[in-house]
Image (cartoon, rainbow, N blue to C red):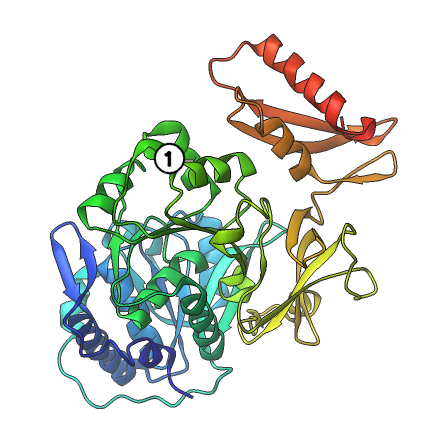
Amino acid sequence: MINFVDYLFENSRPSNRPFLLESDMVVTHAQLYDTVHEIACALFERYGSGNQILLISENNYFFIVSYLAIIKSGNTAVLIETRISEKDLAQVVRSCPLVACFVQEKLLDLFKGTPADTYTENSLESLSNGTFELSIPVHPDDVAVIIFTSGSTGGKKGVMLTHKNLIANTESILGYLHLTELDRVCVVLPFFYCYGASLLHTHIRAGGSVVLNNKIFLGSVISDINKYKCTGFAGVPSTFQILINKTHFLTEELPNLRYFTQAGGQLPNKYIKMIVDAFPQKEFFVMYGATEATARLSYLPSRLVEEKMGSIGKGIPGVTLEVLDQNDLPIKPGEIGEITAMGDNIMKGYYNDPEGTAVAVRDGRYYTGDLATVDEDGYIYVVGRSKNIIKSGGYRISPNEIEDLILSLEEVSGCVVVGVPDDVMGEAVIAVVQSPGADREGTSAKIMSLCNTTLPSYKV
């Protein structure tokens, strides 16, 4: 099977079109590939293939080159977040037999005493000292990346993604977003998470380009989108909520922008409607995924966003996405079950955790832990995590439904609904509400009135 990095550059390798735009830096596809190839050759000469090499860095040229070179050399890139705690970092270093670490200079203090060879931005040139024909044969199930992400127990889980996983998911995303070499995405999401990494993957494969925005003030993306004539912008719910509540985002024109994508959690319907109303000529894709699924599992076509408001859509090409009951049978419209998935994008498993893998993946099917319902057309609506469903007086209550209702009030900008222990009901429903500058008592009364007239009593 073709190495994932060779797949990414299969069409764009000789291209002199820009790929990376960051401050005053412009790097073409051809320049990027040549540097990646040189460093991959150096890594192969020093360490061979089949080893684990750690990478920790913010989004920058150093991350991109290191990440791609590690994979192209036939080794596994071990990705960790830049704000990892010392305890979690020690766990990762202890569990992985690392032969080398690529560490952004400003993060070096975290790696004092680490036995593996360490490289920084200043080491890249020393590694670029000649090339040879490097073609490492890979098996589809060879692990290309391990992404350490937070587990339900609080510890870090290493999600093992193969060359087959990465290629399959990249192809699917390219298909429904219709990306071409003319597309340019403004990136605020970190590459060490699967959503951010998918932006990197798809735009190399399509021959497009990426603009990196690492500024503290998120509102700066508006000027970057216009300055670099970006056609795409991707965010998690908080990205869009900050832009709406803290900037003039909704009054901007963004003339070159073609589409938005949103994943990484459920953006309240209130905010989706605001964006769709403000930008009627631009596509807004609601997406759903998981690190265990390489990145993406479903999407809702932009043309259906208002008709199917709140839905995550259906499975992406190549993925069978089903909501199953406790007997593993598809649920009927209106019933609640667990979202499950099958496809070439489903992880190989959790690193050094066969028990955890056996719980999450059974007979090739990934059990997400997310509960959902479906409508008559088969579109899926998430109602909550299985661990987050509130059980009150024998009823199962979705926090999402109540949150969306409260957020429909103009005075409310944020809301989270939780269950707390209750001697009578088992759990009582509590809403924590953000309402800047509002009359506290008046808003509370308005919320209670809305809930009492809209919801059954056990949900209030």
- The residue closer to the viewer here, 108 or 76, is 76
Quadrant showing the C terminus? top right
Q: Secondary structure at mark 1?
A: helix
Residue 387: x %, y % from top left? 71, 47
Tell whether 262 sits left or right of 319. left
- The residue closer to the viewer here, 259 or 198, is 259
> Can residue 112 be seen in this snapshot?
yes
Residue visible at 32% across and 74% down in the picture = 70
Quarter where residue 396 is shown: top right
> Can residue 115 be seen in this snapshot?
no
Residue type pointed to by label 1 = Leu
Residue 114: x %, y % from top left? 36, 62
Quadrant showing the N terminus? bottom left
Residue 276: x %, y % from top left? 44, 41
Tell whether 125 sits left or right of 450. left
Q: How many marks?
A: 1
Tell whether 348 sits left or right of 221. right
Tell whether 323 sits left or right of 53. right
Examine the rendered structure and indicate whether residue 292 appears above or below residue 426: below
Residue 413: x %, y % from top left? 50, 26
Residue visible at 77% across and 30% down in the picture = 459
Name the residue tied to disc 1. 243
Quarter where residue 458 is shown: top right
